[in-house]
Amino acid sequence: MIRRAKISEIPDILTITQACAKKMQEKGIFQWNEHYPSKEAFIQDIERNELFVIEEKDTVQGTIVISTLMDEEYKPIQWLTPNGNSTYIHRLSVDPELQGKGLAQEMMDFAENFSREKGFVSVRLDTFSQNKRNQRFYEQRGYQKLGDIFFPKQSEHPFHCYELVL
């Protein structure tokens, strides 16, 4: 089941994202670190009603943020649709023990349907240039790669921006 996250679930959420960071680092992908994703970011997501969790039997298995807020870093990108009517996906994570079971696909289906039902014209996101698995994941869903942005606190390598027109 996918639903909005509760503030009391932040410790569980951080446990999952830290486990994801460790798993990526073991594969040489330095995408997430001690700066990101942060407890403060998740608190803000909850305050904005934009953080969702996937759960089974009262256990949080993963997270996704569906935001309407466009980050400053995204402004230079030549998007496929005009700014102002898109959702932005952030902090998609699945407990490493449960990866490969379709939970990320399920959360992306949810995010895309949510965006479509609310009348948004597209879904936008970025993914780390060194994370080929994530790039394939989004490209197989029909996302188009548009340009690169940088998050210096996370990496010297760029992040690719993607958009799916609904």
Image (spheres, rainbow, N blue to C red):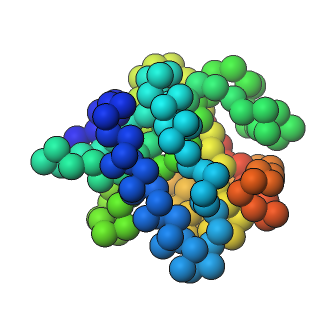
Quadrant of the image for the N terminus? Answer: top left
* Vertical position of residue 93 compared to residue 156: above or below: above
* Vertical position of residue 118 compared to residue 102: above or below: above
Q: Which residue is at the front of the view, 91 or 79?
A: 91
Q: Say left or right for 123 vs 158.
A: left
The percent position of residue 5, horizontal first and vertical second, equals: 34, 33
Q: Say left or right for 17 vs 82.
A: left
Instruction: Give the farthest residue toward the left.
Output: 57
One can see residue 78 in this view: no
Instruction: Give the farthest residue toward the bottom.
Output: 27
The percent position of residue 132, horizontal first and vertical second, equals: 62, 71
The percent position of residue 90, horizontal first and vertical second, equals: 56, 43
Q: Which residue is at the front of the view, 77 or 58?
A: 58
Say which residue appears at 16% left-offset and 44% top-offset: 58
* Vertical position of residue 159 compared to residue 157: above or below: above
Say which residue appears at 64% left-offset and 26% top-offset: 69
